[in-house]
Amino acid sequence: MTQKTKTIPTNKPVVAVFGATGHTGRFVIAELLRREMTPIAIARKALSEAEFPEKVVRRQATVDDAALLNQALHGAQAVINCAGPFIDTADAIASAALRAEVHYVDVCAEQISASKTLEKYAWPNPDKLYCRSYCPRHPKVHEVVFALVDEVCDAFEADAFHAGMDEVFYIGEDQCPRCKGRNKAELFAEEVLAIHDHLQAAKRQLWLWGDRLLDGKLTGLGEWEASRNDTYPAVDLIPKDVVICDWHYERADPTAVYFAMKGLDVVSCAWKNPDAAIAQVKDMVRFRESSTPQMKQHFQGVVETIWSGSGDFLDQYYGRKPANEPKNAGYTESKCFVRMFEEIANLK
Ligand SMILES: [Zn+2]
């Protein structure tokens, strides 16, 4: 079976919806139209003219016909899978999305299907890493990123925004026509500056993780806690009013001094290791005490970071749930938090 897959004349995003005639599919189509995008309604049965408004492109495909799915996604930038049971559809539609090189999203609430999809398609990639390349020079990237930043900042009435930018393993990749061959530190710093300037226009401050600004080879900190992909010279290129979150989760590496000496404000960040957290508190105090007024101002303190849900953290903090590290009960986010703040409370 074949069907016409003519070019869709629009400069707005084209989004395919698989399972378009279902309960959720209809909501998704309506929302795409409300956002002035062009939906491609894909259903298992042929769609009649009366089924959707004229602007909706109608196509027919089933999960067991890969060629037909390929045709159905023609011209789309993304596909939203609304057709359950997802255990029967997610793999076929995600594969079709990969073949078509378009984004895949589903509205799955089936845990087994979601975990299978993530296992097969997301983690880890062939480098054993979890992330994908972000192109700072894509002409539309900031349209998306800034809108997201603004929405989050507005919702939380924030005067500072932590943009992350840690563990950027891929930047300036050879596959990118815009970034290929570019200096990676400059690309990274350019992006920091772009986000910084956007936030500054709304009188908001930018916070960042520090790992991309440390030399992973020289320090021996490796490719996660520091940079082995040549972004670290960016430390001299970024604006001086960015706050650096200097995370070290196993040892209290004294790299806060390095950031301070670059003229940057810095906070040391702990996670689960109470000994490292206590050392970070003590170091912060010592760095301040043994610094000139010019340097002292940069040592801004410590932060406890958690990488679980806040609910889980609070349950452990209040003893409603056992520690999430059964082998080493003292080595948890909540224990680290408690001991870090005990150390702070004991300061003169
Ligand atoms: Zn790029």
Image (cartoon, rainbow, N blue to C red):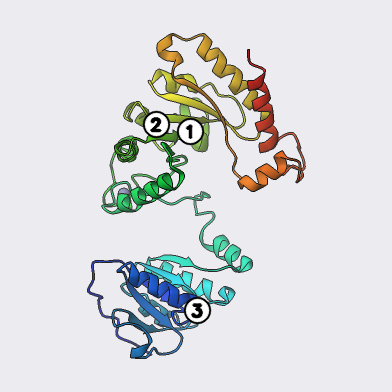
Counting residues from the start of the chain, the first of labels 2 and 1 encountered is: 1
Q: What element carries label 2?
A: helix
Q: Position of residue 17 (x, y in %)?
A: 41, 75
> Dot 2, how many residues are within 10 Å of its Cα: few (below 14), some (14-19), or many (20+)?
many
Compared across the picture, whether 217 is left or right of 304 comes to left
Classify mark 1: residues with Cα within 10 Å, few (<14), some (14-19) or many (20+).
many
The residue closer to the viewer here, 95 or 6, is 6
Name the disc covering residue 226, or none: 1
Q: Which amino acid does label 3 sit on?
A: His
Identify the residue at image location x=37%, y=47%.
150
Residue 289 vertical placement versus 147 (above, below):
above
Q: Which mark is residue 232?
A: 2
According to the image, label 3 marks what residue?
A: 23
Task: Name the kind of residue labelled 2 in the image.
Answer: Tyr
Structural distance between the alpha carbons of marks 2 and 1: 8 Å
The tag earlier along the polypeptide, 3 or 2, is: 3
- x%, y% of residue 202? 32, 39
Q: Can residue 78 be seen in this view?
A: yes
Residue at coordinates 40% horizontally, 12% vertically from top-left? 294
